[in-house]
Amino acid sequence: MEMFNKKVLKGRIGPLKKSKRLDTLEDVEKYVIKKSKEYGLKTSYDVMAEEMPYFDTMGYTSYAGCFICQPLNLKFRTEQIDEAYEDETEVLDWVGYFKQTIEEKQANKYQDRRKPKEGYKAKDYLVVLPGSNKLKKIICLNKLVKISKDHKYNIWFKPHPITKHQFIGELQDLFGEEAILHRDDDLYHFLVNAKKVYTTHVSESAVYALSLGKDIEPIEVWQEIHHGSFFHINRRLYDNKSTEWINKTFSSHKSGVFHPEIDTNWKEKVDKYIEYTCKKRDRFKGWFIDNRKPKKNKK
């Protein structure tokens, strides 16, 4: 159990505290771990890796207040989302849920977000940046420079809450202090007022923005997008820009997206998802052999 382990969270997000609204996912985490073990699968929280098609590990994390599962294999992650959209199932109102969480000021992943200061005016364009660990690795600086020039004084850059002051200073030098929001500002106050949101394949802001009818566009370098923890979902958000796609895809068990407040029987949905994924996995048993030497345990 890692999603709600205080020691694990401190190592990942430091002094930040996750929103209490995520507590409803704790039972889902327990159940997913239990069911995965029954199928001989390991589980891993918020870690990305590339295993063989006959994968060993079921990854999981939170996404826009929901619980998502994804095998640690890119082929499976991307195929399951496309198959979810094609699935014939009852379509639920996921978009309505995302809108509601924003309206009720429950969309932030972290607690204690700052209310906007007086003088912070609404701007038509918003750039949502990842944390320091990903900022320079995945973001296209040339794209940011172009966006800044195109929109001049009508754009906000929002640093991630986990951004070092050094990086914020560099952003201020590049784009002007007047264009950089505080890292602890309430992202969704500015997202609601924007006409267009520039974000990434590692941000849940994409689904929130699209749910509100905003135009969205990615800001990463092409070579890095498939490494993102939400790539399998967000790539289709950018491709389709459709709220109908969100509702139809997330409603299917094949999506690996679960929420006790929306899914009428989330346990049954988890059961069907893991069974479906393992049936696909079994087709590849014995196809590839891992020749890497196992790591020796340190004494």
Image (tube, rainbow, N blue to C red):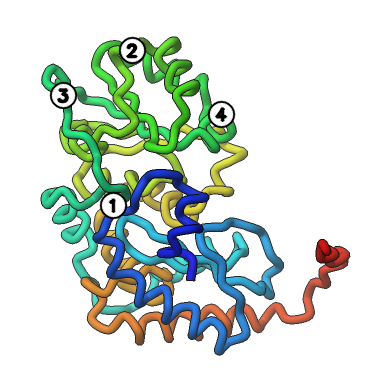
- Residue, x 84% and y 67% (percent of image)? 294
Task: Assess whether mark 3 and mark 1 are in contact (beta carbons under 8 angstroms).
Answer: no
User: Looking at the rendered structure, which numbered label has been put on residue 292?
Assistant: none
Task: Assess whether mark 2 and mark 1 are in contact (beta carbons under 8 angstroms).
Answer: no
The answer to which image quadrant residue 256 occupies is: bottom left
Q: Can you give x and y, in whole percent of width and height, for residue 173 in the image?
A: 44, 10
Relative to 290, residue 284 above or below: below
Mark 1 sits on what residue?
Answer: 242
Relative to 242, residue 72 above or below: below
- The answer to whether residue 33 is visible is yes
* Viewer-side residue, 227 vs 107: 107
**How busy is the neighbourhood of tag 2: few (under 14 within 10 Å), some, or many (20 plus)?**
some
Q: Of marks 4 and 2, which one's residue comes earlier in the chain?
A: 4
Mark 4 sits on what residue?
Answer: 136
Mark 3 sits on what residue?
Answer: 117
Q: Of marks 1 and 2, which one's residue comes earlier in the chain?
A: 2
Label 1 vs label 3: CA separation? Answer: 33 Å
Look at discs 1 and 3 and give the one toward the viewer. 3
| Label 3: which secondary element | loop
